[in-house]
Amino acid sequence: MPDAPPAVAVRNLTFGYGPEVVLEGVNLDIQPRDFLAIIGPNGGGKTTLLKVMLGLLRPWSGEVIYNLPSGHDPRGRLGYVPQFSTFDRDFPLRVSDMVLMGRLGNGGLLRPWSRQDRNAAGGAIERLGLAGVARAHVAEISGGQLQRVLIARALVSEPEILFLDEPTASIDAESRATLGELLEDLNRSIPVVVVTHDVTSIAAMVQRIACINRRLFYHGGPELSLEVMEEVYGCPVELVTHGVPHRVLHQH
Amino acid sequence: MPTFFEALSYEFLRNALIAGVLASVLCGVIGTFVVVKKLAFISDGISHAAFGGMGICFFLGIDPLLGAIPVALVCALALGAVDRETIRSYDALIGVLWSVGMAVGVVFVYKTPGYAPNLMTYLFGNILLVSRHDVAAILVLATSVLAIVALFFKGIVAVAFDEVFARVRGVRVRLLMSLLLAMIALSVVILIQVVGIILVVALLTIPSVISLMLWRDLRSVLLGSVLIGVGITLGGLVLSFYFDLPSGPAIILLGALLLVGVYGRKKIPRYRLKASM
């Protein structure tokens, strides 16, 4: 879609922690129907880039411009599936209550959850095959189930773009299949951005890849050249080899 | 010696009971957030800092509550607003606030002309000294805190559970966090009247810790900690009546006993099971 303006335009973005520069001069467009995989070595800044796009970190310079169907203000319009570590699993909360929290920002903060909120949560729980554990507590479910809960929570907000941080990191085969179908389905209506070091698990859907290692080294189709990969990782990389932490499919 | 129920004809004991029950209800709700959000040290810091405000009020000869409330609120909001990266050691900051508050309080009490109030009463509380005026103040404060928490419940839970996600969803996390800290500050001031500065953190955390061991659903945990709080407060009062014990410590020790008991009950059967396998 060359004519439509990008859903997200990252412009000349620089960010760092303390004196250390983590991202430098990053420019990136995400199209309205993109399925983008952000890859790169650990510590290369991929999660940081995601957090800047989510508005969780303020860039040193540059900007992130949103152009979503509802307008330029991304507040409450972004879907986010974090890695596990952002919350305390011992928190006394049922699966259904956690999914319901995805509705934050869809209505007034002072209003109690509405029937509409509960229906949306129920639908997402059903869609992700979580009906059996809806009454269970967050601490009692498996890693794969929790991953699906996180996705359900992101979906109930009816986001206009979905960001996922390492969604396949600790997930079982069944959940992985569900996740694949689901993302493909979602991608029919909204852009999907996945930060991952394991592109193989979602390779069939990926339309574009962004390689981040402080700078944006490559942005384009999923057929990466060895030279680009070596430049990003700073060392020779084997493509499509098992046991290598960063696997990229050459062809699919 | 009259029984506890006969003694209820005395106004001071009735006041103590009402104040105790109100404080316990508040503890159950606010304490649960303190425990799950790991704010116990902050709460303790606020309660000690509040003494600074109380000391100034002694000196001026006005109601110590009038000094404790603003000081507790300012400390809570300051702790919420301070940039953790710049301050380097947030932990130490709370400790400093704690000591400075106490130092200010002691200096002003020392300089108060004439009758110096008994420091022990404020450090360890004496619920039997709660006046009708105090009960009214506690009622107003406790009701306001509970009403505000109920009003912002959805957001407070979201921020307590997952700040990052709440922020992405456009929730005003800093504002809600400050609100929660302010409510903790007001609760602390109320609790000082009941169990004293040093024991506040215990009454705030013991019922919720017990409740969290027993239940895993937020509503059950909240209700459970309210009931446990009321139980140990009333129980502690009865104990202090019959055995002539200071009321605050009696309440806390009864709570601690219950905590150990529930922990043991939860832990021991599991070990037996493991041993038999």
Image (spheres, grey):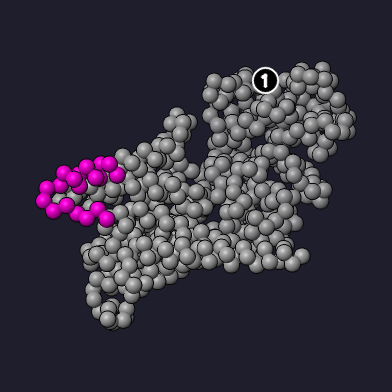
Task: Using the rendered image of the protein, determine whether residue A86 is visible from the camera's viewpoint.
Answer: yes
Please give left or right for residue B116 compared with residue B42 in the image. left
Which residue is under mark 1? A215
Please give left or right for residue A244 compared with residue B185 in the image. right
A207 up-or-down from B46: above or below: above
Viewer-closest of B120 and A129: B120
Viewer-closest of B228 and A91: B228
Residue A177 at x, y = what percent?
81, 47
Residue B59 at x, y = what percent?
16, 47
Q: Which quadrant holds the C terminus of chain A?
A: top right
Residue that appears at 30% across and 47% down? B50
What segment carries the magenta color? B102-120
B89 up-or-down from B156: above or below: above
A100 up-or-down from A24: above or below: below
Residue that appears at 55% across and 50% down? B161
Amino acid under disc 1: Arg
Please give left or right for residue B217 compared with residue A227 in the image. left
Residue that appears at 23% across and 73% down? B11
Residue B21 at x, y = what percent?
37, 68
Q: Tell me the element at label 1.
A: strand
Asked where in the image residue B82 lies, by quadrant, the reply is: top left
Please give left or right for residue B184 compared with residue B208 in the image. left
User: Does residue A174 belong to the magenta stretch?
Assistant: no
Q: Which quadrant holds the N terminus of chain A?
A: top right
User: Does residue B116 belong to the magenta stretch?
Assistant: yes
Residue B34 at x, y = what percent?
46, 52
Residue that appears at 52% across and 52% down? B36
Which chain does tag 1 point to?
Answer: A
Viewer-closest of B66 and B125: B125
A26 up-or-down from A136: above or below: above
